[in-house]
């Protein structure tokens, strides 16, 4: 009975690329549409309208209603930086050291992403280029309660500070007024400039439009629940936003020669995030797939978050047998996974064939979990096949560009001719005449 | 009477930064919210649903209903590339040459924007980096009818091809079946790979989800009306999109020593786009502002698009007197304009103080109109103050990044320690154990 129970618990679908219905089953497996229903949209739009019209007063009221604590005044919504430093000084030394190592590695990697201004001068003296500048002010949403992850603070805050954002404002709800010491310590080591104890759509609205206390920012980043995600979509345009993330995913391509326990645990590490998380293994060796299945069966009962893992594996997981490694690459490029582990010999050769993936973890020693915390690259990554067109969060998300054009008199005369012909071709004669004025001189 | 009529026609508000209500009047001047009402949203959502469920059949029907021509079959929706070449060969030589010069300059500038992959190896042998790849397939929306601009084809298509997008698909509606030869010629010289004669929300839906004839793309770019913009917002997530643009804007900072006719014409060149376009001049010299006002009065009656220009200047234009050039910079940074002209001595020094602008046109010879057609930098630029957080369209919009991580055994052992402490701090023990496996070896 116990064994049967375990077997049932560790249910995960097995697919083979040689199945006639493989592509349609793969499509069904990957299907994900996050839906904000009309009720959520209406609630969020109402909250945004209240914050825009009543500012701090509405922010205090929503915080009382949704987070269950009453601020005596709007000033109480801000946490002084000294409180972050206090958290940093009082967490266990082991955690402080780990946060510091992680922050340093994330910062060192981010520094490689800085884009510099550039320009060139043409033979006639005309200068063309691009000036790169940081955002003035960014807002970082940090979820409260169970899903409060200090690592997310590092990953969102450090690229912003490396980009040169002068004011980084963190918002974090404190349900029941409870603070998370690790989150505060992470904010301290990341260089967060101001912290407000607010959350939900009201926090996003306050960051986007500003209130008497909360200054308006230029971009809002960071994960959140459906209300936060819906609010971010709604304020997009007023401010920039990062991507709206779907459930986390891992795709592992294995040649069949990695310890199957390692692979099983890597699948678990993604599945333990939540019931919608997706863990997929691709391998050309059907025998190895069975070994991983056995590891799953054996290890799952010992996992602290086994209920979540079991649900995620059953609902969205898969072990896929393919013909060969080339087919594995093709399937991976179709899936465009958030996390891709290449657990095999010579991962560098295969990585060059990967066209779409948020992050590529190469070789048997590179557990995806290392990337979540401390390898250096960002753990905010495109999900749900959006790696086809988007990138990890990075310094470039906190910088923007301005084109530079300085025409020499000679260059202007030459460009005026071309611009005039094309502008007249489009019927825009003020454009043409404006250019022609410069050509005449 | 004639004079009075002209004066009235060229009405444009004058503001001074010393006015007590200057900031609130500036806020009102800049206010812009593009609103897709519920009716537009419902129409668009219905069109998207029809395209997703019925594909080509729906696409043919919508094209008949909205564009007024009936395709005999879905195959008729595609225009062969030979037709683009025919347009190229039959337009006037002067236009062909202008398109070629413009395309070459846009391409040369875009080539400076290519981002390369990079990596570095740490002392313990761990490799970190970022692999940069092009999108597989991009879709380019080109409006039909009056607003069909060949220059937009160059500006959207060329960065995609420079990025290495292997298949660039253009959609363009042909109201009444009428083709625009300049648009087709521009598509030819830009290297567009396939053209479909569809438009509206149905074209955006077809690009996002694919039909039997139209292959699904990874990103949709290009301007369009409110239905196109609403459809782009709706499919965002399924595919990437470029920004949703507001009305075009120009902000000119002048030291008072440029020919006032030039400045008036530059203001016109933006205002002639449409009635919502915004033209603003900032100058510390009140006398020069009066000179520009006189130029406006004198030149406006001779403009082909004077009705549109007059409306735009009256509704959204302004001539602003400021205390000094430093204040001009501060106001410009607040406005974060799409186009910023620095019509003054030593524009380079001032450009370094500009934190937010889509494009900066430096010096008296650099008419903004040159940037619209042929200077090289893109004319697709952030509008409505979004230059605070976004950038001109560029090659980087058609590339994406994948993080690379390859841990050496020694590096893995060290990262495993840090990851384990942080993962356990977050209660994610599968993450911890997955990292610890690698540390043990």
Image (cartoon, coloured by chain):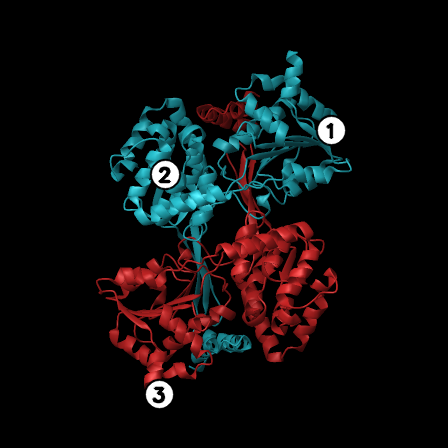
Chain colours: A cyan, B red
The x, y position of residue A358, in whole percent, is 56, 41
Q: Marks 1 and 3, Cα distance to the nearest angstrom?
A: 88 Å
Chain of the residue on which disc 2 is drawn: A
Question: Tag 1: Cα neighbours inside 10 Å, few (<14), some, or many (≥20)?
Answer: some
A98 or A86, which lies in front?
A86
Chain of the residue on which disc 3 is drawn: B
The x, y position of residue B316, in whole percent, is 37, 68
Foreground mark, 1 or 2, reads 2
Q: Which label number is shown at residue A285? A: 1
Label pair 1/2, CB-CB below 8 angstroms = no
Across the whole image, how many numbered discs are drawn on residues? Answer: 3
Answer with left or right where residue B185 lies relative to residue A382.
right
Answer with left or right where residue A122 lies relative to residue B53.
left
Residue for point 61% across, 62% down: B199
Share a chain, discs 1 and 2? Answer: yes
Question: Tag 2: Cα neighbours inside 10 Å, few (<14), some, or many (≥20)?
Answer: many
- Label 3 belongs to which residue? B2
The x, y position of residue B73, in whole percent, is 74, 62
The x, y position of residue B56, in whole percent, is 70, 56
Share a chain, discs 2 and 3? Answer: no
B143 or B231, which lies in front?
B231
Answer with left or right where residue B78 lies relative to residue A379.
right
Q: Marks 1 and 2, Cα distance to the nearest angstrom?
A: 48 Å
Q: Which label number is shown at residue A171? A: 2
Chain of the residue on which disc 1 is drawn: A
Question: Tag 3: Cα neighbours inside 10 Å, few (<14), some, or many (≥20)?
Answer: few
Residue for point 64% across, 36% down: A347
Foreground mark, 2 or 3, reads 3
Label pair 2/3, CB-CB below 8 angstroms = no
Q: Where is residue B78, by image quadrant?
A: bottom right
């Amino acid at each position: 009975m116990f064994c049967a129970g375990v077997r049932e618990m560790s249910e995960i679908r097995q697919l083979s690329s040689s199945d006639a219905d493989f592509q349609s089953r793969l499509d069904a497996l990957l299907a994900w549409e996050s839906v904000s229903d009309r009720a959520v949209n209406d609630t969020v739009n109402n909250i945004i309208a209240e914050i825009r019209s009543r500012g701090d007063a509405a922010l205090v009221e929503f915080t009382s209603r949704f987070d269950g604590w009453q601020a005596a005044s709007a000033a109480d919504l801000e946490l002084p930086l000294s409180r972050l430093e206090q958290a940093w000084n009082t967490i266990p030394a082991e955690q402080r050291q780990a946060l510091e190592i992680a922050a340093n590695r994330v910062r060192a990697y981010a520094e490689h992403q800085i884009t510099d201004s550039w320009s060139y001068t043409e033979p006639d003296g005309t200068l063309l280029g691009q000036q790169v500048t940081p955002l003035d002010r960014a807002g970082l949403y940090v979820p409260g309660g169970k899903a409060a992850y200090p690592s997310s603070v590092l990953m969102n805050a450090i690229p912003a500070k490396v980009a040169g954002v002068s004011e980084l404002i963190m918002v974090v709800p404190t349900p029941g007024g409870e603070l998370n010491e690790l989150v505060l310590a992470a904010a301290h080591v990341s260089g967060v400039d101001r912290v407000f104890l607010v959350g939900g759509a009201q926090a996003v609205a306050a960051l986007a439009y500003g209130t008497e206390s909360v200054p308006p920012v230029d971009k809002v980043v960071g994960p959140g629940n459906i209300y936060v995600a819906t609010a971010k979509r709604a304020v997009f345009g007023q401010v920039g936003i990062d991507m709206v993330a779907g459930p986390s995913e891992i795709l592992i391509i294995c040649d069949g020669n990695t310890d199957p326990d390692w692979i099983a645990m890597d699948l678990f590490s993604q599945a333990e995030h939540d019931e919608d998380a997706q863990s997929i293994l691709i391998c050309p060796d059907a025998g190895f797939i069975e070994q991983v299945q056995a590891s799953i069966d054996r290890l799952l009962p010992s996992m602290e978050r086994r209920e979540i893992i079991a649900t995620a594996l059953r609902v969205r997981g898969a072990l896929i047998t393919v013909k060969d490694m080339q087919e594995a690459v093709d399937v991976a490029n179709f899936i465009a996974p958030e996390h891709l582990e290449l657990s095999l010999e010579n991962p560098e050769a295969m990585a060059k064939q990967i066209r779409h993936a948020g992050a590529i973890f190469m070789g048997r020693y590179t557990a995806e979990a290392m990337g979540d915390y401390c390898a250096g690259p960002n753990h905010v990554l495109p999900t749900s096949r959006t790696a086809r067109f988007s990138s990890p969060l990075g310094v470039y998300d906190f910088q923007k560009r301005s084109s530079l054009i300085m025409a020499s008199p000679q260059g202007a005369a030459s460009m005026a001719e071309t611009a005039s012909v094309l502008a007249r071709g489009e019927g825009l004669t003020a454009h043409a005449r404006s250019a022609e004025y410069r050509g005449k001189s």
